[in-house]
């Protein structure tokens, strides 16, 4: 969380940094700030609120001139969101300025030590401690900024992506990372620094992704020098060519990124299977699996670690892997798994699912699994992300950048990849017949068009949203493959509309939640033909006899549920294991429309951030 951006070169830094912050705002948005150096003066402006508030304040208060600049958009960890705690932070002399994404865990003891040496602190942040520690090293050891940053970082415990500028050395920026992402855009005599590549994509396609434990000094007009923070050894910079384009990270005529991303699902899913699923040949190609097939297929069990929506995709995968590939699966919250001394052996394959590939708990769970000898496999969306690099092998989801904080296309493309994995394994192990395998591939090929069809229910969904937008609670029920979809539907509603919602396995309702049902309670029931249909219909009867309001997601042409439910939303028919790819769509739209009608900030819901790089 938190977005950092920086520029050093021949252009005016302000527009680059400002635009970069707007692109990174999904990472945190409770406050923002920018520091600029115009060759004589180091100026700074910061404020509680959004990047738009910063723009107004900055343009009124300081000159925007300067060819060096750093900026930050914050998701508060230490210290409440206010002007003072916003980044950048100055050192006591006012010469050095820093932006930081992460947490310095031992900041309190470092702060006490610095105070004994006369340092004063204006903010409650760990970051202000770090910048003064750097200044202290320079004053005590008479070293350059890069060395001082290195010495200071070696005294810290925690996680960081930082950019530091010293006006006494105005031709360089020093950056470092441990546990938080940091990319360096390499242009002609200019460098861009950012938490991901989106801020500099229109200026350069060349990027260096720092590895954990690395730092770099970028000098105007010179080459980048990368070193290991621990032992000072030099690292050869690896410059990657980026595949991202500008269009992918803009709204393209939609009112919100979330809506755009919901509508992108047909193409995101076909991008995810294209080149992998060779239907006529009856083959699935996935390099990460092909290269490690024996190890993966001989696993005694799969453990899936993930958080939030990705954890829900993991639950769907549990059904698919057990059903198709007959491998026992456990699905774990990464945050619980990493701290509970889990039993892991060399016979386990641990699969991390993560859109960002940066989630701190998922990353830690993977590291733990590796230490214990398990084979690790990453299902990530962001290419080159930390989890994708840390795992032994993996498969990308190819959903394209997901900017709305609420995950949509990441979820359905994760399910797509996991389904391909299960089918490939099932074929290899002989747990699925050839004809069934082919049938699955052909059905998967039809999914993008069926999603387009599901998106046509938008008008009905909008009407339903209007009826229930003021409900204080909502229940989501599903069985089998659609149970995780119920959880996901409830999460979507909670996170963007702030309405309390719970997802439940439909049959569990009578063991407690049925007590909640009265004529005020909207209950969303996923009741598609494939998937314990008759049982779900009985559950609907139970709700109806207690006067709950029923919104049912049904298969095209279903008349039975139509007679029982208050509202129905139809989705096309498909095979049971693929129904989550269709039933999820109306639930995403329902939460979207409710949130819009309630006037909520759909793309940047309160208290959330897209990439949770702190535990
Ligand atoms: C919900 C949402 C979060 C993420 C979770 C994991 O809409 O976006 O619950 O799914 O923070 O993030 P990743 O997938 O990046 O590891």
Image (cartoon, helix red, strand yellow):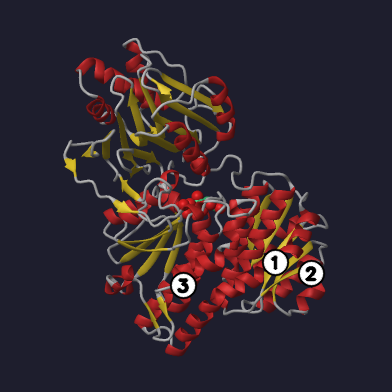
Q: Position of residue 40 (x, y in %)?
A: 37, 17
Numbered label attached to residue 525: 1
Task: Name the front one of labels 1 and 3.
Answer: 3
Q: Residues within 10 Å of mark 2 (few under 14, many from 20)?
A: many
In the figure, 388 relative to 266: above or below? above
Q: Residue at (36%, 51%) from the top-left corner?
A: 205
Can residue 596 be seen from the camera position used here?
Answer: yes
- Mark nearer the N terminus (1 vs 2): 1
**Residue 529 lies in what quarter of the image?**
bottom right
Please report the residue visible at 54 percent of the width from the left and 60 percent of the height from the top.
409
Mark 3 Cα within 10 Å, few/some/many (few <14, many 20+)?
many
Identify the secondary structure beneath mark 1: strand
Read off the residue under disc 2: 565
Closer to us: mark 3 or mark 2?
A: 3
Residue 513, percent across and down? 70, 58
The single residue placed furthest to the top in the displayed view is 118
Of residues 343 and 445, the one drawn nearer to the viewer in this rendering: 445
Secondary-structure class at tag 3: helix
**Residue bearing mark 3:** 419
C-alpha gap between disc 1 and disc 3: 24 Å
- State yes or no: discs 1 and 2 in contact (Cβ < 8 Å): yes
Q: Nearer the viewer, residue 242 or 147?
A: 242
Numbered disc 2: secondary structure: loop
Q: Is residue 27 visible?
A: no
Decide which of tag 3 and tag 2 comes sooner along the chain. 3
Label 1, label 2: how far apart the Cα atoms are: 9 Å
**Percent x, y of residue 48:** 57, 28
């Amino acid at each position: 969380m938190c977005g950092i951006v920086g520029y050093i070169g021949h252009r005016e830094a302000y527009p680059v940094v400002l635009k970069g912050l707007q692109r990174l705002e999904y990472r945190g948005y409770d406050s923002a700030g920018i520091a600029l150096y115009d060759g004589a003066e180091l100026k700074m402006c910061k404020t509680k609120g959004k990047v738009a508030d910063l723009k107004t304040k900055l343009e009124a208060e300081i000159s925007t001139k300067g060819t060096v600049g750093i900026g930050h958009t914050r998701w508060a960890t230490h210290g409440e969101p206010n002007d003072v705690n916003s980044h950048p932070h100055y050192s006591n002399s006012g010469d050095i300025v820093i932006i930081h994404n992460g947490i310095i865990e031992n900041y309190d003891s470092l702060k006490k030590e610095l105070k004994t040496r006369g340092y004063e602190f204006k903010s409650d942040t760990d970051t202000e401690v770090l910048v003064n520690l750097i200044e202290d090293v320079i004053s005590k050891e008479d070293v350059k900024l890069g060395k001082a940053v290195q010495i200071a970082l070696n005294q810290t415990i925690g996680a960081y992506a930082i950019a530091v500028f010293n006006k006494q050395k105005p031709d360089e920026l020093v950056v470092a990372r441990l546990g938080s992402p940091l990319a360096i855009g390499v242009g002609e005599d200019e460098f861009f620094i950012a938490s991901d590549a989106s801020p500099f994509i229109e200026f350069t396609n060349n990027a260096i992704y720092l590895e954990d434990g690395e730092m770099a000094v970028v000098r105007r007009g010179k080459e980048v020098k990368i070193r290991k923070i621990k032992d000072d050894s030099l690292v050869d910079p690896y410059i990657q060519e980026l595949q991202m384009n500008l269009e992918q990270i803009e709204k393209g005529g939609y009112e919100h990124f979330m809506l755009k991303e919901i509508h992108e699902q047909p193409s995101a899913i076909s991008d995810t299977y294209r080149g992998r699923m060779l239907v006529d040949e009856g083959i699935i190609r996935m390099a990460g699996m092909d290269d490690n097939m024996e190890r993966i297929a001989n696993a005694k069990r799969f453990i899936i670690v993930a958080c939030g929506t990705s954890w829900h995709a993991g639950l769907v995968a549990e059904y698919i892997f057990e059903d198709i590939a007959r491998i026992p699966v456990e699905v774990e919250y990464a945050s619980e798994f990493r701290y509970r001394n889990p039993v892991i052996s060399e016979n386990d394959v641990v699969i991390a699912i993560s859109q960002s590939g940066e989630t701190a708990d998922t990353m830690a769970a993977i590291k733990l699994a590796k230490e214990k000898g398990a084979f690790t496999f990453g299902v990530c969306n962001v290419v080159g992300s930390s989890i994708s690099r840390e795992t032994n092998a993996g498969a990308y989801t190819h959903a394209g950048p997901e900017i709305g904080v609420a995950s949509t296309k990441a979820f359905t493309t994760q399910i797509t990849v996991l389904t391909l994995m299960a089918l490939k394994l099932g074929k290899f192990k002989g747990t699925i017949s050839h004809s069934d395998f082919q049938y699955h591939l052909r059905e998967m090929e039809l999914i993008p068009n069926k999603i387009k069809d599901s998106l046509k229910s938008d008008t009905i969904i909008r009407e339903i949203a209007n009826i229930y937008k003021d409900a204080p609670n909502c229940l989501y029920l599903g069985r089998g493959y659609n149970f995780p979809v119920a959880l996901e539907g409830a999460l979507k509603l909670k996170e963007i509309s702030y309405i309390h919602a719970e997802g439940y396995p439909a049959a569990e309702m009578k063991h407690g939640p049925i007590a909640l049902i009265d004529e005020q309670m909207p209950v969303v029931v996923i009741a598609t033909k494939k998937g314990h249909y008759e049982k779900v219909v009985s559950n609907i009867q139970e709700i109806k006899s207690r006067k709950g309001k029923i919104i049912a997601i049904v298969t095209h042409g279903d008349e039975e549920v139509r007679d029982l439910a208050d509202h129905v939303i139809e989705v096309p028919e498909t095979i049971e294991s693929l129904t989550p790819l269709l039933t999820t769509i109306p639930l995403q739209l329902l939460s979207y429309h409710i949130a819009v009608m309630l006037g909520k900030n759909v793309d940047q819901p309160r208290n959330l951030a897209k990439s949770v790089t702190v535990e």
